[in-house]
Amino acid sequence: ISNSISGQVFVFDPVTYEKVKTIEFGENAFPVGIIVVNQFAFVALSNRNRVVMIDLKTFHVIQNFDHFNEPDGMGYTKN
């Protein structure tokens, strides 16, 4: 679950519904879009013009994708 005001994404356990992690992106990051593909989550940081890739095992950002203009939604398809 993203909180665009605080710049955080909250990760919840799907069985217990308990919050297990808070990922901080900082003030004005505006995380608005999240998509999960396999073991990775992609989060659109609209005010940073960036999409980040998060490893869902470690909850660390492992890659930044820049050059976007206010990304706010994503889609995924298998080739």
Image: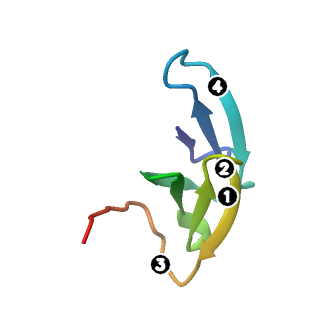
Task: Give the Cα distance between marks 4 and 2.
Answer: 16 Å
* Mark earlier in primary sequence (1, 4): 4
* Mark earlier in primary sequence (2, 3): 2
User: Looking at the rendered structure, which numbered label has been put on residue 69?
Assistant: 3
**Amino acid type for the residue under numbered disc 3:** Asn
Residue 53 point in image, percent of width and height: 58, 63
Q: Are marks 2 and 1 in contact (CB under 8 Å)?
A: yes
- Residue 75 relative to residue 63: left or right: left
Residue drawn at (45%, 53%) of the image: 38
Outermost top residue: 16
Up-down: is 79 above or below 53? below
Q: Mark 2 — residue?
A: 7
Pair 2/1: label in front: 2
Task: Give the Cα distance between marks 1 and 4.
Answer: 23 Å
Q: Mark 4 — residue?
A: 19
Residue 50 point in image, percent of width and height: 57, 72
Q: What element carries label 3?
A: loop
Viewport quadrant of the C terminus: bottom left
Pair 4/3: label in front: 4
Tell me which colouring the rendered structure shows. Answer: rainbow
**Amino acid type for the residue under numbered disc 4:** Lys
**Amino acid type for the residue under numbered disc 1:** Asn
* Mark earlier in primary sequence (4, 3): 4
Task: Give the Cα distance between marks 4 and 3.
Answer: 31 Å
Q: Are marks 4 and 3 in contact (CB under 8 Å)?
A: no
Task: Give the Cα distance between marks 2 and 3.
Answer: 18 Å
Residue drawn at (54%, 18%) of the image: 17
